Every structure is written in C-alpha cells, then in structure tokens.
Image (cartoon, rainbow, N blue to C red):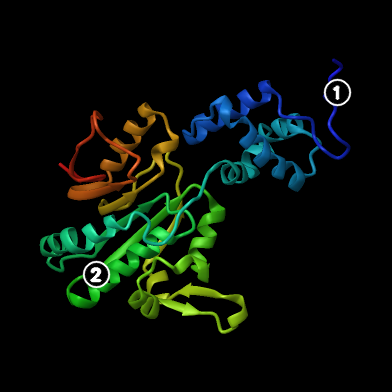
Amino acid sequence: MNRNTNPLPGRPAPLSDKDFRVFAEFITSKLGIKMPSSKKTMLEARLNKRLRVLGLPGFDSYRDFLFSETGQRDELPHLYDAVTTNTTHFFRESKHFDVLRDTLLPGLHARLRGSRELRVWSAGCSTGEEPYTLAMVLADFEAQHSSFSYRMLATDISTRVLEAAARGVYVMDKIDDIPSAFRKKYLLRSKDKKKRLIRIVPELRHRIVFRRLNFMEPFRLNKPRDVVFCRNVVIYFDRQTQERLFRRIADQIVSGGYLFTGHSESLTGMNVPLRAVAPTIYQKI
C-alpha cells in the first residue's frame, strides 16, 4: 500500500517520534511532568496551536525556535501554558475545607494568639478557585475571631492562569458549589446581567498575592507557611520527583503546620517530615 504521509495543504506534517522524544525529555527536565508515548497525540494538538500563533510551518521549525536564544527567553512560558492541565473548581474536595474550618483553624488560632497573621500557600493555584475558596473560609473564621488574620500566597507555573486568577472573574456556572451565604458575602454580580459573570470581592482579592513558581527550579518562600494546599499537582510527576518536591515543600512549613494533598496523591513510604492526621492531610513534625 502506498501511504501518503504528506500533510494536507496548510497543515504541518505530523509530530515525528524523534521530535516528540526531544520535546518530552525537555518538558520532563523543566517541569517534572511525565510525557510517555501515550501523550504524543495530546502534545501534538497543543503544540499545533503554538505553530499557528507563531506562523511556523512545522514541528521541526518550532523545535529549532524553542531551543534558540529567543525561544528560550520568550517561548518557554507559552510552552508551559500549553502542556500543563488546569482543572479546578470552587470547594473542590470539600472535606478539606470542613476539616480546616472545624478542626485545624481553632488550634492554629490558639497557637498564634494574635501574634501574627496565619500564613497560607495555595501551590498550583490554577485559575484561582482554590485560593478564593480558602479565602472565603478564612475570612468567615476571621469575622468570628477578632484577633485572627491571614495572608495568602498563590502560585502556579502558568502565567495565563495566574492572570485569570488575579482578575477573579468567573462565569455564573462556576459558583454552584459555593454556599449561598458565601455567595452573598463574597461575590459581586456583573451589572450587565446578560454576561452572567461574577467577581470575587476586593476584600478577598487583596489578601492574596499571585506569583509564578516552577517546582523544578530552586525556590524558598520569604516566610514559612502554617497551611499549604498542594493538591492534584504532583500526580503528573514520577515518584522520585514527588518525594523530592514534598521534602522541599515541607521545608517551607512551620513546625506543627499542615499540608493538604489531593485524594489521588499519597506520601506513604516517602522520607518526608510529615505525619498523616487525616486522609490526605499531613502535619509537619
């Protein structure tokens, strides 16, 4: 059979196995994300969008551009945006917020005794639903305890999602899981009812600092955190990288502070200074 491998007019040739391996190894080295051959179709589809934006004829041209001095300076953030997955919603894995509110915050508040703000880190914050959920819970607790206060850092590798998170604007369909009392208190509806948009109130937006952070690069926060949410982030890393990352995150947590992970993530068998206090909730020891 004569197989015609030429692309259709206006379409680039398919991503070759050789170029896929080059991209996959580079992505793993820079982001820690595993890129097995099963992800070739996904990567090809996402890089196709970059070809169109840049006006490049094929993946070989994109490869040459990516590894050029200009590409390494200008294209890496776009590549990171293309290959990272950002799935999130308000009050995702809601049990975590129940435990934080009912069990952990009273103890943390008693320990701090108003000496300083509670320091929180949402690591892998995506488009902001997680840190804003945390902010609602913390603000509600603050309203009931006059000596309590908090500040939050929210980080992600994707500049695109960080920009969306900082705006704090969401479609109405996104707010179904937010309790009605919180909707009334912490959400603003667009004056144009046809747009069906809401925005997080300024009081919460101003309590969160959004910043880009790549887990594969050396990092140290300016101050250790009392509470860290790092959920559904390390599932894309191999086990060795996961353990190394959790050790680095533990270094950023105060003694007695807490780490929340995703329900599909486990620290079992890892050499990290964290002990389980509830499913997927760990305390620094």
Q: Nearer the viewer, mark 2 or mark 1?
A: 1
Q: Residue furthest bottom?
A: 191
Q: What residue does disc 2 label? A: 149
Q: Quadrant of the N terminus?
A: top right
Q: Is residue 116 above or below residue 29?
A: below
Q: Residue, x 65% and y 41% (percent of image)?
A: 46
Q: Which is more toward the observer, 177 or 231?
A: 177
Q: Is residue 95 left or right of residue 73?
A: left
Mark 2: few/some/many CA within 10 Å (<14, 14-19, 20+): some
Q: How many marks?
A: 2
Mark 1: few/some/many CA within 10 Å (<14, 14-19, 20+): few
Q: Is residue 117 above or below residue 26?
A: below
Q: CA distance from mark 2 to mark 1?
A: 66 Å
Q: Residue, x 29% and y 67% (percent of image)?
A: 137
Q: Which is more toward the observer, 45 or 161?
A: 45
The kind of residue tagged 1 is: Asn
Rendering quarter of residue 240: top left
Whichever of callouts 2 and 1 sits on the residue coming sooner in the sequence is 1
Residue 284 location, x and y as percent? 19, 44
